[in-house]
Image: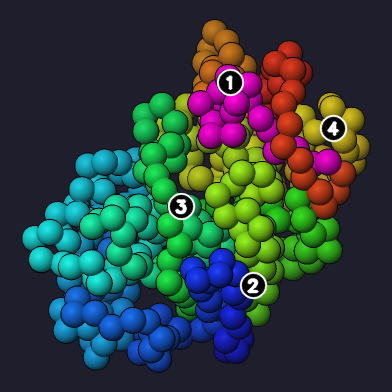
Amino acid sequence: MNAPDLQTVSIDLQDRSYPIAIGGKLFDDPLTYSGLPGASSALVVSNTTVAPLYEARLRAALQGKYQNIHSVTLPDGEAHKTWETLNLIFDALLNNGCDRKTILFALGGGVVGDMTGFAAASYMRGVPFVQVPTTLLAQVDSSVGGKTAINHPLGKNMIGAFYQPLLVICDLEVLTTLPARELSAGLAEVIKYGPIADMAFLDWIESNLDALLAKDPAALAHAIQRSCEIKAAVVGQDERESGLRAILNFGHTFGHAIESGLGYGAWLHGEGVGCGMVMAAHLSQRLGLVDLSFVMRLTRLIERAGLPVRGPVLSATDNAGRYLDLMRIDKKSEAGEIRFVLIDGPGRAAVRAAPDALVREVIDACCA
């Protein structure tokens, strides 16, 4: 099937507004980049998995616009989202004499996008960058909204900056090479938008999940567009997560604990989020915010998407205690009190605290 026509979603942030382009055959078309500012040099940041597939095509598309196109290839995986890897980007910029007009292109998944954005925010106190996400998860979530970061051994994404790109290019064609596990991980972030903001979208995902798993271009285009529309509306109101934007972290408090507790990379980010949504839904139900049928509906959908719905055991002696310790390092915590994104009725989300005893019950019930 041919890819659908180009769709554009706008992030409205006054003078820092930018488009998200969604369609087929976008990233290696020189016209895609025609609106970007001129510069003498560009730096393509990718990783060892994506660079052999797409870097030469991106460089060819940029050839007529930039006199010098440099590149740096990072090691692949969440375990490498560190200061050491970030410095490889700075090394490439400095070794090639890149100035403050140099444009960085993040060609890869969420890890590449986050680190390239953080490098762009920091180099010479800020240089422009473009997101070219190559995973479904990055296209529907991490490339949109300007969150950039690296991990710390004690917590995920704890060191970073809010820094918006000039452009996000969601090319459906690059998803054809995505492994099934990565596709499922991306579907976790797609599913997330239904319970927190749009139950009609959740209905659509349930009806079209098989098409999404089969990488049907029309289904993927709609899922990416609607996800980006919801995220754009939230980010436009609360760029720096002082309130409303926190709802986009549904499932992430439990999920980040799983990722850091197992060691970064053991579970993919989307796998942690998928399981975390199940746990957050159970907590919502125990607080009387949703009924059990809603929890089971969401759990079935997450399982159908190929995602785990049972949490791992992080401690043989006090598993719930280990989860609680890790979740207290979460960015939403206040004065040591864990704040959860909960479903406050289908299609609505709220950020609130919950008694430790109740959270322990949920962890004990939801872990393998």
Secondary structure under badge 2? helix
Instruction: Mark 1 and mark 2 in contact? Answer it, CB < 8 Å.
Output: no
Tell me if mark 3 has few (under 14), some (14-19) or many (20+) residues whose alpha carbon lies within 10 angstroms of its own: some
| SS at badge 4 | helix
Give the residue at x 53% y 34%: 331
Residue 114 placement (x, y as % from top left): 40, 53
Q: Which residues are magenta?
A: 327-344
Q: What residue is shown at x 71% (from left), y 21% (from top)? A: 359
In the picture of the structure, the residue carrying the numbered disc 2 is: 225
- Disc with the residue nearer the chain's start (1 vs 2): 2
Q: Which residue is mark 3?
A: 162
Quadrant of the rendered image containing residue 13: bottom right
The Cα atoms of the two marked residues, 1 and 2, are separated by 37 Å
Q: Quadrant of the C terminus?
A: top right
The residue where tag 1 is placed is 335
Using the rendered image of the protein, determine whether residue 185 is visible from the camera's viewpoint: yes
Inter-mark Cα distance, 4 to 3: 33 Å
Between the residue at mark 2 and the residue at mark 4, the CA separation in whole angstroms equals 30 Å
**Left or right, 368 with reference to 347:** left
User: Three-letter amino acid code at disc 3?
Assistant: Phe
Compute the Cα span from label 1 to label 3.
Answer: 23 Å
